[in-house]
Image: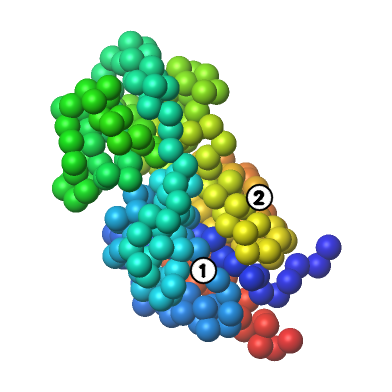
Amino acid sequence: MSRPSLPKVIATDCDGTLLRSDGTISPRTQAAVEAAEAAGITIILVTARPPRWLDELASVAGEHAIALCGNGAFTYDLSSREIISHRLMDPDLVVQLAAELHEAIPDIDLALESVAGFAHEPGFERMSGRTDGFWAVGPVAELVASPPGKLLVRMPSADVDELFAQVEHVVAGRAEVSHSGAAGMAEIVATGVTKGMAIQAWCEEHSVEAADVWTFGDMPNDIPMLTWAGRSFAMANGHEQAKAAATDHIASNDEDGVAEVLEQALASALRN
């Protein structure tokens, strides 16, 4: 089957994919994204980040852009800076999972991302050093007063793949477990909630077929959208599982891999 020269939608991960390792977008990638938008392509950011961390990236995805955040738990309107929909976890299940996780993996600390913002157990430390969005500290049984979209499991000394496997074993199919490559961190969202589900739902609402979507990612939490889209691109710096899931492999984030793909696609479309 021949592939279209240009997609209708590009859904891209942010950290490790669209952004360089220092968290910035290069001038080349910014220019390529703007050129794609000018050509009529819709750019959607699909990320593990919480909604409030997308404000700083508003220029990346255009004036009226949508971001699918928290691994699909939140849909965020970048123009109005509002969460316009969400897929939250059941508070009772979160409390139960927290107890079981602490019993099985004693050295962990937990945090929650909800519509209210960020809340955490006393021992949880943010790797980023950010203080934004904080609303509460305490036991999970109190923090679920604002039902979370995402439960974060942190054990700084752990290998991320090993921690993921431990957490997945405890969760046992009652929720979705993934990781985005962050050191010593596993992420839990409601059953069925993934980046792939989120972009699929958005595309169905806007009558866009999977064949007309290109996705870009680098980590295991990107796999559901890499396997759903008509064409998918894994970064050279990415996890081996993400590379195995993608239809194409491209240069690393620090080498402007996304920009290179967009530039070539736009140039090819002009020639045709």
User: Residue 209 or 17: which is nearer the viewer?
Assistant: 209
Query: Is residue 22 placed above or below 62 in the rendered structure?
Result: above
Query: Is residue 161 placed above or below 97 in the rendered structure?
Result: below
| Residue 114 in the image, given as x and y percentages of width and height | 33, 41
Q: Residue 43, labelled with which disc?
A: 1
- At x 40% / y 39%, what residue is drawn? 149
Question: Which of the 4 image quarters holds residue 59?
Answer: bottom left
The answer to whether residue 71 is visible is no
User: Residue 258 or 136: which is nearer the viewer?
Assistant: 136
Instruction: Identify which amino acid the numbered label 1 is placed on.
Output: Ile
Compared across the picture, whether 46 is left or right of 211 comes to left
| Residue 78 in the image, given as x and y percentages of width and height | 38, 65
Q: Residue 228, labelled with which disc?
A: 2
In the rendered image, the quadrant that contains the C terminus is: bottom right
Query: Is residue 122 placed above or below 216 in the rendered structure?
Result: above
User: Residue 132 or 265: which is nearer the viewer?
Assistant: 132
- At x 23% / y 36%, what residue is drawn? 119
Q: Residue 212, labelled with which disc?
A: none
| Residue 228 in the image, given as x and y percentages of width and height | 66, 50
Question: Which of the 4 image quarters holds residue 1?
Answer: bottom right
- At x 24% / y 25%, what residue is drawn? 142
Instruction: Identify which amino acid the numbered label 2 is placed on.
Output: Trp
Q: Is the image coloured rainbow, by chain, by secondary structure, or in one colour?
A: rainbow
